[in-house]
Amino acid sequence: MVLSRRWSAFLVLVGVWTWLIWPRFGLAIYRDDRSFADGSPTSFLWVHALLITASLGIGTTVGVLGVRAWRAGAPAPRRAEENAVVGPVPPKD
């Protein structure tokens, strides 16, 4: 199955968006008062770390699939030899 360029671009943008949003959210979770108790990470931090990791993995996969779909939808480059006319062209009847 070959996706359109529009859908391919959408998937790439979803991957980029994921990498723009989730690391910043992870930093906010890390700095949250509920993340550590007596110097040890709490379940609040672990659950959010798992969610962030899963989201980054899914976003990366979606972005990579978008790039691959974009490349698959690109027209194949034409070789110069195929377009070159060598010698006289016979008339068509």
Image: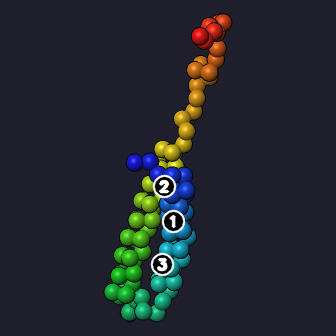
Residue 60 x, y percent position in the rendering: 45, 61
The reply to whether residue 67 is visible in this rendering is: no
User: Which residue shows up at 35% across the image and 81% down it?
Assistant: 46
Secondary structure of residue under mark 1: helix
Colour style of the rendered protein structure: rainbow
Can you tell which mark lies on residue 47?
none
Q: Looking at the image, tell me whether mark 2 or mark 1 is earlier in sequence order.
A: 1
Residue marked by disc 1: 14
Where residue 20 sits in the image (x, y, percent)?
55, 70
- Label 1 neighbour load within 10 Å: few <14, some 14-19, many 20+: some
Instruction: Residue at 62% x, 21% y: name it.
Output: 83
Figure check: 31 above or below 60: below
The three-letter amino acid code for the residue at tag 3 is Gly
How many other residues sit within 10 Å of disc 3, few (<14), some (14-19) or many (≥20)?
some
In 3D space, how far apart are the residues under numbered discs 1 and 3 (Cα atoms)?
18 Å
Residue located beneath label 3 in the image = 26
**Residue 66: mark in rendering:** 2
Q: Tell me whether the residue at label 2 lies in contact with that at label 1, contact meaning CB atoms closer than 8 angstroms.
A: yes
First-in-chain label (1 vs 3):
1
For badge 1, the amino acid type reads Val
